[in-house]
Image (cartoon, helix red, strand yellow):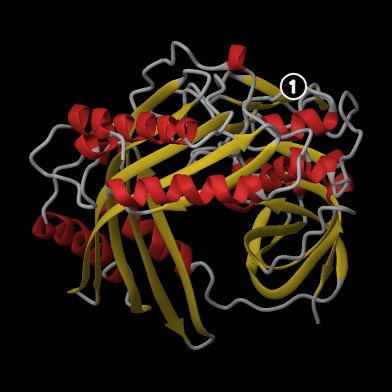
Amino acid sequence: MPKSAASHAISNDISTDISMTEQQARIQQIVEDLLKIAKDMGASAAEAGASQDAGLAVNVRLGELETVEHTRDNSLGISVYFGQRKGSASTSDFSPQAIRETVRAACDIARFTTEDPYAGLAEAELMARQPPDLDLYHPWSLDVAQASALCLECEDAARGHDSRISNSEGASLNSGSGVHIYGNSHGFIGGYPFSRHSLSCAVVAEDESGMQRDYWYSVDRQGQGLDSPRQIGITAAERTLARLGARSLSTRQAPVIFRAEVASGLLRSLTGAISGGALYRKASFLLDHLGRPIFPEFVQIEEDPLQPRGLGSAPFDNEGVATRAKALVEGGVLQSYVLDSYAARKLGMQTTANAGGVHNLAIKSGELDLAGLMREMGTGLLVTEMMGQGVNRVTGDYSRGAAGFWVENGEIAHPVEEITIAGNLRDMYLNLIAVGSDNQLPGSTRTGSWLIGQMTIAGE
């Protein structure tokens, strides 16, 4: 075993007496050792990623502390190349012996793998040699008592908001931080510490019409960036109460508003359809649509991986390629696919720095808020929840269970449940009428509500 692997490997527990800087340096040394061992075992190229994080998860229900969980997780993966034969292996054990065995397993796989002319590292000149500091690390010093108090305040606000709140699924707080390191045999190695904190609440309301459930949450890199526990609880209660008295609809054609939290799913369907894997497998309804209109002219969709403190921010992708802000859709026209280096080679293109996915996706909002969109729609369906997985990426056919509200004359008439909405994503995108200004959705996807023209609503 190389001396460096033995001297720098760290235990499976995150030490509480070392700084994040020291932790980052130790994990970086592990990645460097991995690459050296791979080279010593005959690999012509290699790449490795390692992360280590720790967290606290607390859940309360009906005013009582229910669960407390302290998490400490390791993750390490390596891919080796013997020419254009690739092998990969992973482990959660950071001991020197496990590290060496993991590299050996990857090498053994590669030696017996068929050559793939598209396999290999991303191009050396695309590496993030000077990655920016995106301010992603904001640890939150909470003990169990403090975390429990925040959860109790959140749940109490929800339960006390209205006498019809009859039960609770609890309030949960999750707080975690760690470090991620990636390196490859181009001589690139980089990493950054990160944190993520969230608080959520879900409650049940009941009246003579039956019972309904809903929730709300807040998530941020900074604990201080979360909405107040009271506001989260009240929002969860109000969303739940609004659903009481829901009923089905008769089958019809009508315009549909997808409220912001479900509209984000339409954006994810877009990025899935323009991802490299779907495209080179010819399994996308947007195959060969680069440079073609797929939305109305007013639509602009962008990715900004370099957003300070962004929940989806990253200075480089999973292959070390420097990320950058770019337009995916501009003037309604598809401007870019979403590619890693393998998919890019298969398609005769260049990676778009999206190995591992899209970072901080956003669609430009219009001037109308949700109430304004409902007035614009007049009569139709406001969708607030989707069920099922009825999206066909190959054809674009879309059919999912839904719940929400029926709108008449621009005002909510009554809540709706047990319906299905259907259409085709290609038509839905082209028939997008407006995007709302209500874009303060928690998370890494920024969108307002979407107003879409006629869709089929199947009910009674």
- Specify the quadrant that holds the C terminus: bottom right
Which residue was labeled with disc 1? 350
Which residue occupies the foreground of this view, 25 or 174?
Answer: 25
- Left or right: 163 as drawn, with respect to 37: left
Residue at the image position 60 percent from the left and 45 percent from the top: 87
Rendered location of residue 395, percent (x, y): 90, 54
Which residue occupies the foreground of this view, 117 or 65?
Answer: 117
Q: Please, is residue 88 above or below residue 249 in the view?
A: above
Residue at the image position 45 percent from the left and 32 percent from the top: 40
> What is the total number of numbered labels drawn onto the structure image?
1
Kind of residue sitting beneath label 1:
Gln
Q: Please, is residue 10 above or below residue 160 in the view?
A: above
Decide: few, some or many residues near mark 1? Use Cα within 10 Å; few <14, some 14-19, many ≥20.
some
Rendered location of residue 158, percent (x, y): 31, 65
- Left or right: 158 as drawn, with respect to 404: left
Res 402 quadrant in image: bottom right
Residue at the image position 56 percent from the left and 38 percent from the top: 80
- Left or right: 121 as drawn, with respect to 144: right
- Specify the quadrant that holds the N terminus: top left
Q: Secondary structure at mark 1?
A: loop
Rendered location of residue 45, percent (x, y): 57, 29
Rendered location of residue 117, percent (x, y): 79, 33
Residue 456 in view in this figure: yes
Residue at the image position 41 percent from the left and 29 percent from the top: 36
- Left or right: 381 as drawn, with respect to 58: right
Which residue occupies the foreground of this view, 254 or 58?
Answer: 58
